[in-house]
Image: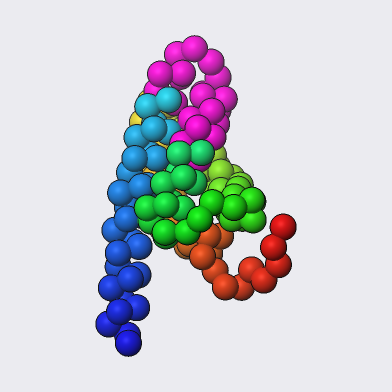
Amino acid sequence: MFKNINKKRLAEVVKFGIVGTIAMIIHYGIYYVLLPLMDRNVAYSIGYFLSFLCNYLMSSYFTFGVKLSFKRFFRFLCSHGINYFIYIGLYNFFYWIGVPAEWAPLPVYLIAVPISFLLVRFALVSRLWKSDF
């Protein structure tokens, strides 16, 4: 019994890594393209939002194998709302300590990704959410 649970969790972690890498590339790519055109926080936020939409679809279908629903989308939105403040706070911290704007998102990903996994998993598949919208 425990072997199946461990394999399932390991598969989720691997799939989360794949999805997270794709979402990170989308986020960073959009941010990098927009950076010369606008305020760095606005560019970062637009990249985050667009990668969020892709991340929701990929996490639902590929990582956790759950159907799309308003309830899951709302929980995913809430978990990523928390993530956003972690990401933007860390981003501004690294920028403040002197990391160039072009590179500041990279250490953020290293710190925030494990937190993201826990929040997203809880939002999409937790049995603690009893009510439906």
* Quadrant (top left, top right, bottom left, bottom right) of the C terminus: bottom right
Q: State the image quarter where residue 117 is shown.
A: bottom left
Question: Seen in the image, is 39 located left or right of residue 108?
Answer: right
Is residue 133 visible from the viewing direction of this image?
A: yes
* Quadrant (top left, top right, bottom left, bottom right) of the N terminus: bottom left
Please tell me how many numbered marks the rendered image carries. 0
Residue 42's place in the image compared with 123, above or below, is above
**Span colored in magenta:** 31-52
Question: Seen in the image, is 37 located left or right of residue 2?
Answer: right
- Residue at 34% from the left image edge and 78% from the top image edge: 5
> What x and y, as percent, mark residue 131?
71, 67
- Residue at 30% from the left image edge and 49% from the top image edge: 18
Residue 34 among magenta residues: yes
Residue 42 among magenta residues: yes
Question: Seen in the image, is 6 located left or right of residue 31?
Answer: left
Q: Describe the colour scheme in one phrase.
A: rainbow
Most foreground residue, 22 or 34:
22
> What x and y, as percent, mark residue 110?
36, 49
Residue 124's place in the image compared with 48, above or below, is below
> What x and y, as percent, mark residue 10?
30, 68
Q: State the image quarter where residue 99 is shown.
A: top left
Is residue 82 visible from the viewing direction of this image?
A: no
Principal secondary structure, stretch drawn in magenta: helix
> What x and y, as percent, mark residue 49?
54, 35
Q: State the image quarter where residue 28 is shown.
A: top left
Most foreground residue, 133 or 79:
133
